[in-house]
Image (cartoon, rainbow, N blue to C red):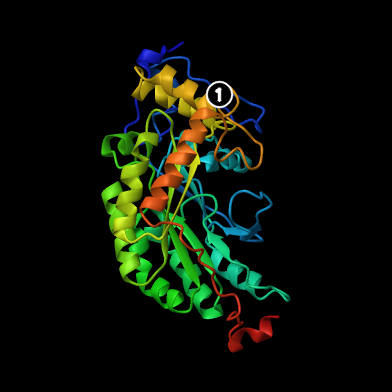
Amino acid sequence: MISEEEKPYFKGRGAQFNPHNKFLKDVYVKEYSEGIDDWEESDRKTSFIFENGKTIVNKVDSPDVGMAYSLNPYQGCEHGCTYCYARNAHQYWGYSAGLEFERKIIVKKDAPALFKKFLEKKGWDATTISLSGNTDCYQPAERKFKLTRQLLEIALAYKQPIGMITKNSLILRDRDILQEMAKLNLCMVYVSINSLNEDLRQVMEPRTTTAKQRLKVVEELSKAGIPVGVMVAPLVPGLSDHEIPKILKAVADAGAIHAGYTVVRLNGAIGPIFEDWLHKNFPDRFEKVWHMIQSCHGGKVNDSRFGDRMRGDGNISKMIKDNFKLHCRLNGLNVKDIMLDHSLFKVPSDQMSLF
């Protein structure tokens, strides 16, 4: 059996192994470091799997995620963020939440057609749809497949309000569409920034845009008249929570008008993935950080209670909450809510026959 010391570290990947998919009966393990068992390291490239679905817009039943509907053109994400809650969903597709989540990307090529079909449902009330509620709609695959751009073009044609969240500067490619939507009060963009420390980002979010570039995204979208908020998520106690004042000052200076946060929670397969990553990258701080995360979730690293799971509870969570609230106030963030316009929605006249 291979010891932990002998296992290679996959640079450019967040997860360092494939935890077992709980929905699969068989378990595969690597017994030797040479020969025919060299199966895990042999497939380091990203592969794309094309999926034809029946629907693309999903109703969100969780009351504490801030969205009613989500639309995800991709499943799996090459960004490789170690803490990503979307990892668990990859298991439903028959893959692992670990390396396979980052290497095997499901591309929903019929997403634009399914989106049109959804918007043309009789009685649709133009409730805001979030792009994406699960994996990043501007992950590297988008540069090749351009599904997100097509979805935005449809949203503009139908005057459908859209909320977005991303950590990829590729969103600037679609500034032209977003600017037209913003003129009609049809879009709101959130940029995810959980640290300004480039060394931390490189190991925790290995294939994402730098924090400097994300601040540029905030600035350029804001200058284009597009309302921009920032999600400082997730904050990792003992690793990034001390950056709250600096982050909020930077995003406000860049033009952000809103800011929210979450405290890291390690549910399902994310727990062992993050634990392994923390051991390998911050061995000297492992015990401190792990226990601080546990203190935010009642002695565990995950809390499934609605309302508490995203922010945690206990003394450390309260300090994070108070600090965040204080610096939002000092930087003029969250002064007013952004309410998108749902009254303009209309199926284009050349689509009426599809009802």
Q: How many marks?
A: 1
Which residue does the numbered mark 1 point to in the structure image? 28
Where residue 102 sits in the image (x, y, percent)?
44, 41
Relative to 251, is 264 on the left or the right?
right
Which residue is at 46% across, 10% downward?
A: 1
Classify residue 43 by image quadrant: top left
Camera-side residue: 331 or 72? 331
Q: Classify mark 1: residues with Cα within 10 Å, few (<14), some (14-19) or many (20+).
A: few
Camera-side residue: 262 or 129? 262
Where residue 289 sits in the image (x, y, percent)?
43, 24
Instruction: For residue 144, say whether it is visible.
Output: yes
Give amino acid for label 1. Tyr
Camera-side residue: 216 or 34? 216
Which type of secondary structure does the marked residue at label 1 adopt? Answer: loop
Q: Quadrant of the C terminus?
A: bottom right
Where residue 247 sits in the image (x, y, percent)?
33, 46
Which residue is at 37% across, 40% downward?
A: 205
Classify residue 160 by image quadrant: bottom right
Relative to 343, is 36 on the left or the right?
left
Where residue 33 sits in the image (x, y, percent)?
39, 16
Which residue is most to the bottom? 349
Relative to 241, is 291 on the left or the right?
right
Instruction: For residue 8, say whether it is visible.
Output: no
Is 289 above or below relative to 69?
A: above
Is 111 above or below relative to 281?
A: below
